[in-house]
Image: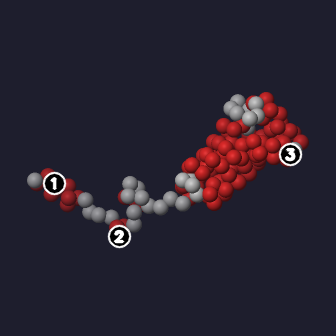
Amino acid sequence: MLTKWEELRLVARCVAGDDRRAFERLVEEYQQPLRRFLLNLTMGNASLTDDLAQDTFLKAYLGLRSWQGVARFKTWLFRIAMNEYYGYLRRNREILPDDPPDSIPVDERVDTAGATEARLDV
């Protein structure tokens, strides 16, 4: 496991000199734990896990300059992964029974006004 100082050094090499070998070292270190984390989130969907892991590392690489070094690199990376997973869920969301009525097509809405009046009469 990398120390925080090693992470800082590797990220600095990536940012200062576009050192892809330094980023490769970060990927080697965190690829398996990240994939395990995503595999649990996706309930065993290996294909989705691979896609999310790839997107996570790509976003991390492109956003290295925004990492402030306050939290560990691993923490930042896993937050990106969680955001990627949430984004996937939002993009692929289907209408669920708990959705607000506005998201249900007009044909499928049930008139509840009469049901409320009937309960009051009982």
User: How many angstroms separate mark 3 from mark 1 (CA)?
Assistant: 70 Å
Q: Horizontal placement of 43 versus 113: left or right?
A: right
At numbered mark 3, what does the secondary structure look like: helix, strand or loop?
Answer: helix
- First of labels 3, 2 by sequence position: 3
Residue found farthest to the right: 17
The residue pinned by badge 1 equals 119
- Image quadrant in which the N terminus is located: top right
Front position among marks 3 and 1: 3
* Mark 1 Cα-neighbour bin, 10 Å: few <14, some 14–19, many ≥20: few
Q: Horizontal placement of 108 versus 28: left or right?
A: left
Front position among marks 3 and 2: 3
Q: At 39% across and 63% down in the image, what residue appears?
A: 104
Q: Quadrant of residue 8?
A: top right
The amino acid marked with disc number 3 is: Arg
The amino acid marked with disc number 2 is: Asp
**How far across and how far down the image is residue 121, in percent?**
11, 54
The amino acid marked with disc number 1 is: Arg
At numbered mark 1, what does the secondary structure look like: helix, strand or loop?
Answer: helix
The residue pinned by badge 3 equals 21
* Mark 3 Cα-neighbour bin, 10 Å: few <14, some 14–19, many ≥20: few
* Mark 2 Cα-neighbour bin, 10 Å: few <14, some 14–19, many ≥20: few
Instruction: Determine if residue 86 is in view.
Output: no
Q: At 89% across and 42% down in the image, what residue appears?
A: 17
User: How many angstroms separate mark 2 from mark 1 (CA)?
Assistant: 24 Å
Give above or below for 85 relative to 66: below
Instruction: Determine if residue 44 is in view.
Output: yes
User: How many angstroms separate mark 3 from mark 2 (CA)?
Assistant: 57 Å
At numbered mark 2, what does the secondary structure look like: helix, strand or loop?
Answer: helix
- First of labels 2, 1 by sequence position: 2
The residue pinned by badge 2 equals 107
